[in-house]
């Protein structure tokens, strides 16, 4: 019996692919998403964990991109207040760097071109009196303080997939698209299960190539287009050190090479420092931080911080590639962060996604559906700006109250444990909490939470749980990892059933 064609097959389970799948499913379209690894397992978990306008992009006159990104900060705060949280940033001024008048002008635009409502405006701080000044080397007098947001990037990706599935999309993690050809006006997409090797062919009215760093490779290898590449792969690496100051604000430093460096309080006890920017010309899956990058980040941070940062201080590091649209910029840091959508008629529509940034993924998805609408003929309008992501249906300032309520109803939870759960799951946290005697696997991860991640968020390995669904990998030793791996292996059948659904 012939299969009913999907309206859209999405290739790639990063934030752009999952955002497109969610938007399309919510408009009543039949959607299948195929991701060759774990959801959010590449670029969408390698970011600096920010929802931000991109202050430095103003220097490159990217006003449309910055305006769109600034507006999205507050939209995403409302849609996912558990994942997207306001943060204040201090930009210390140093003579010889960007002049103060230029910073004031940039921050004035930053305050006003994006329709800011919820976030507080820019302020000027005296670092000789402000408590944050103690974290810096002597001699800095003035800092500009402005607003942006911190985000859990991998969870943002997974929750878009979760909502897409709740609206009828088929989400197929660890499933590779090996070939796609058009016959009789339909795509015939060959899917291969990465774990079993089993292949199947599904028909589709359209294909969206949102494979991120692999978008050009997908065009060349599976979609039959060996034309010139459109993606510029830029490596970005980060280091994580133990937190050295109690102030909740982050720093953004101006480097002598013209780049900026973030030092961001992260996961309560740590500071995230990054990022580097250099071209990458290898396999995106093989990228790793180099000793030279680690040294660069340590030296750049030490130019500003009172206590020098050394490679020995690094508790964890990560590296990834950003698939930027290749606009011919001479330096990696100057390449556009905007997105480009290319629609082709191959006998059936093919839409390829090039570039983009985490902050604007939702707007990218709307633009993608607008490009496909004439060919697919659906009438449903954009809807995602007013629909919270799973667990996000509570007030922007309601996180503390939600954690207090969770702890009241489950007194055995510690304060930090309850806060971690609501920051990850929002109002879904109750489903991740078991009884007081729930077996503990590692850190404060218990069996009920691990099963919840297997059954509802496509987690299959300890790495999925410790580094993408949570960040407990920062706190778990080798014995804890082994205990979780054993638990995941014992529940592999449940994971396979969940994937099939």
Image (cartoon, rainbow, N blue to C red):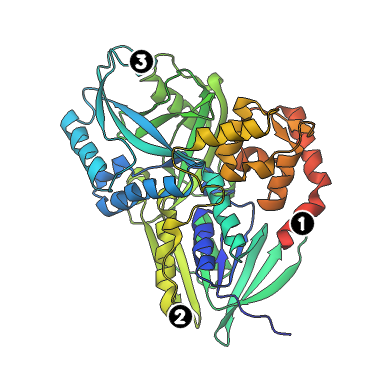
How packed mark 1 is, by other alpha carbons closer than 10 Å (few <14, some 14-19, many 20 or more), is some
Q: Is residue 375 left or right of residue 165?
A: left
User: Circle 1 sits in a helix, a strand or a loop, which is it?
Assistant: helix
Q: Which mark is residue 131?
A: 3
- Residue 169 in the image: state x and y as whole percent: 60, 65
Residue named by callout 2: 377
Q: Are marks 3 and 1 in contact (CB under 8 Å)?
A: no
Is 471 placed left or right of 345 in the picture?
right
Indicate the quadrant where residue 7 lies: bottom right
Q: Is residue 416 above or below residue 471?
A: above
Q: Residue furthest left?
A: 101
The location of residue 282, given as percent across then percent down, is 53, 49
Q: Residue at x 49, y 19 (%)?
A: 310
423 lies above or below 305: below
| First in residue order: circle 2 vs circle 1 | 2
Q: Earlier in the sequence, mark 2 or mark 3?
A: 3
**Real-space CA distance between mark 3 and mark 1, rounded to the nearest whole angstrom:** 52 Å
Q: From the image, tell me which residue sits under label 1.
A: 496
Above or below, 110 relative to 403? below
Q: CA distance from mark 2 to mark 3?
A: 58 Å
């Amino acid at each position: 019996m012939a299969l009913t064609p999907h309206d859209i097959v999405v290739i790639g389970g990063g934030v752009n692919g999952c955002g497109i799948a969610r938007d399309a499913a919510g408009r009543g379209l039949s959607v299948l998403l195929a991701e060759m690894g774990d959801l959010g397992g590449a670029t969408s978990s390698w970011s600096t964990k920010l929802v931000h306008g991109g202050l430095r992009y103003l220097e490159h006159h990217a006003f449309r991109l910055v305006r769109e990104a600034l507006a999205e900060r507050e939209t995403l705060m409302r849609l996912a207040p558990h994942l997207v949280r306001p943060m204040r940033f201090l930009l210390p001024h140093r003579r010889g760097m960007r002049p103060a008048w230029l910073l004031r002008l940039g921050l004035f635009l930053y305050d006003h071109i994006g329709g800011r409502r919820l976030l507080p405006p820019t302020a000027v701080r005296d670092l000789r009196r402000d408590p944050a000044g103690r974290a810096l080397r002597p001699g800095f007098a003035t800092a500009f303080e402005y607003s942006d947001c911190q985000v859990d990037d991998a969870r943002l990706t997974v929750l878009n997939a979760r909502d897409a599935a709740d609206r009828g999309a088929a989400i197929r993690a660890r499933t590779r698209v090996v070939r796609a050809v058009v016959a009789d006006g339909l795509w015939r997409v060959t899917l291969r299960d990465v774990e079993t090797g089993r292949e199947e062919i599904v028909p589709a009215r359209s294909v969206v190539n949102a494979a991120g760093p692999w978008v050009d490779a997908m065009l060349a290898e599976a979609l039959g287009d060996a034309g010139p590449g459109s993606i510029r792969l830029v490596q970005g690496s980060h280091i994580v050190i133990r937190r050295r100051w109690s102030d909740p604000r982050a720093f953004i430093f101006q480097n002598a090479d013209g780049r900026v460096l973030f030092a961001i309080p992260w996961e309560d006890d740590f500071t995230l420092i990054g990022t580097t920017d250099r071209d990458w010309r290898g396999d995106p899956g093989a990228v790793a931080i180099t000793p030279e990058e680690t040294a660069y980040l340590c030296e750049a941070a030490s130019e500003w911080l009172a206590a020098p940062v050394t490679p020995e201080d690094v508790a964890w590091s990560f590296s990834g590639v950003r698939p930027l649209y290749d606009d011919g910029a001479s330096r990696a840091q100057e390449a556009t962060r905007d997105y480009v959508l290319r629609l082709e008629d191959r006998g059936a529509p093919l839409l390829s996604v090039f570039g983009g940034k985490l902050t604007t993924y939702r707007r990218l998805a709307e633009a993608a559906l607008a490009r496909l609408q004439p060919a697919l003929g659906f009438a449903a309008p954009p809807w995602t700006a007013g629909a919270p992501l799973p667990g996000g249906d509570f007030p922007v300032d309601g996180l503390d109250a939600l954690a207090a309520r969770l702890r009241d109803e489950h007194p055995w939870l510690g304060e930090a444990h309850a806060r971690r759960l609501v920051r990850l799951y929002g109002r879904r946290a109750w489903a991740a909490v078991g009884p007081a005697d729930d077996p503990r696997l590692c850190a404060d991860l218990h069996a009920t939470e691990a099963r919840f991640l297997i059954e509802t968020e496509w987690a299959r390995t300890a790495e999925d749980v410790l580094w993408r669904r949570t960040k407990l990998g920062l706190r778990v030793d080798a014995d804890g990892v082994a205990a979780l791996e054993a638990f995941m292996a014992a529940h592999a059948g449940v994971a396979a059933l969940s994937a099939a659904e």
